[in-house]
Amino acid sequence: MLLYLHVPFCRSKCGYCAFHSQVPDDNAVQVYLDALMREIALWGDRLGNVSVETIFIGGGTPSILPSKAIDVILNRLSKTFAISSGAEISMEANPESALRDSFLHDVHASGINRLSLGIQSLNRDLLHTLGRPHSAKQAIEAIERARQSGFANINIDFIWGLPGQRIKHWLEELKQIVKLGPDHISCYSLTIEENTPFEAAYDDGKLELPSDDDQGKMFLYGSDFLELQGYSHYEISNFARMGFQCRHNLGYWEGADYLGLGPSAVSTIRSRRWKNTKDLGEYAEKTRNGQIGEYAETLTPHDRMEELIMLRLRTARGLRLAAYKELTGRVFMEDFRPMITALHQHGLVKIRNGYLNLTKRGMLVSNTIIENLFEAMDRL
């Protein structure tokens, strides 16, 4: 099983972000920690000493918490579940909060062995546009401090396709990124999410994004450059040096069971899915009353097949065609031959060794391809 733990706090809200978070105070942090301990205990009673292969502490901004709190959380998890020997234990952090005192040294000593730094850009103006609270200098210092603190597995997050960004700017930034020596790089295209300040600005014509053609070139040229630098392009937005693929995310993409802890966290175990309330007070009350996970939906074989297609086609390995037959009793190529033939003729998909995977150009239009596959499935 995979374990995800959501920390719902940020010092400020970035204009593009749709994830649930709130500005913390001492009382809110304590309410959260107390409720989290109750939820961990609750699932320990329900699931028993279940084996956990990976832990991912995300948010929000987990590095807002005191390092002692991270230590307490990990200790409680290790006493409640059977954490596998050599488990990947990741934590997200923002550069400015990660740099305080001995934070990075302390969380590494507590058991965090993979650090994911949310940098997003090394350009001062773009950082300001995004609403990021750190500087490029702090980002570089955070990477250096993490290495000094013992981290041998560091990911850094970046966003491309930003307002005012040009192809040459993105490629120049990638050169800077590679010089920093991260083990893993996540490069996400900017998405205009609903109910965010970026959506309002975009709708009002105040946010001008690069053209679709330029964004396509940023993706294609950028991925080619990173692969030349020794980073395997193993998922649409993710690149890793050999041996540093994110095991937690691979688990999601391969359909593993996962337990989500904290406000707004989602869980899927044995084809049952539920989501915690995002309201901190309501979450705390539900942990007191043992009402966590009580309203779960059961995923149908059709639901599971759609997820399998959506998640596997994001990866370089692709969709194992035999898995389609295992879930549906049908043959993939018999059901989708005209569509797959057309996609192959346009250089968007490949089939080899029993797997269907998207080419780089196919990845550019992955959402459209997957939507068309879903529509075809609904007609069967």
Image: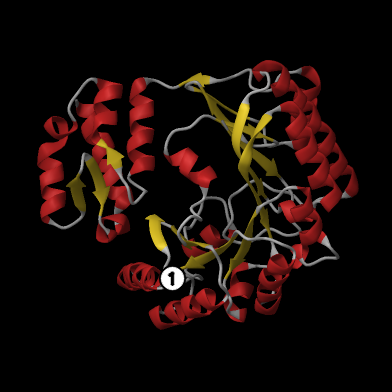
Q: How many marks?
A: 1
Question: Would residue 39 be seen by someone viewing this image from the given angle?
Answer: no
Above-or-below relation of 138 to 113: below
As shown in the figure, which amino acid type bears the numbered disc 1? Leu
Q: Quadrant of the N terminus?
A: top right
Q: Is residue 62 left or right of residue 210?
A: right
Whether residue 341 is situated above or below residue 325 in the rendered picture: below
Q: Is residue 245 visible?
A: yes
Residue occupying image coordinates x 70% and y 36%: 262
> Hey, which residue is sitting farthest right in the picture?
27
* Residue designated by label 1: 209
Q: Residue at x 35, y 21 (%)?
A: 301
Give the side of residue 32 with respect to residue 253, left or right: right
Position in image of residue 272 (x %, y %): 51, 21
Q: Residue at x 44, y 22 (%)?
A: 299
Name the quadrant containing residue 295. top right
Q: Residues within 10 Å of mark 1 (few under 14, many from 20)?
A: some
Q: Picture coordinates of residue 343 (x, y %)?
A: 16, 50
Of 59 and 53, the residue lying toward us:
53
Toward the viewer: 279 or 82?
82
Outermost residue, front side: 85
Left or right of 276 in this view: 286: right
Q: Residue at x 71, y 22 (%)?
A: 44
Q: How far across and how far down the image is residue 179, in percent? A: 54, 78
* Quarter holding residue 61: bottom right
Q: Is residue 149 left or right of residue 58?
A: right
Instruction: Find numbered disc 1 in the image and state the secondary structure of the residue it sits on.
Output: loop
> Hey, which quadrant is residue 3 in on the image?
top right
Q: How is the image coloured?
A: secondary structure
Instruction: Return the x and y of residue 231 as percentages of the image width and height.
Output: 43, 65
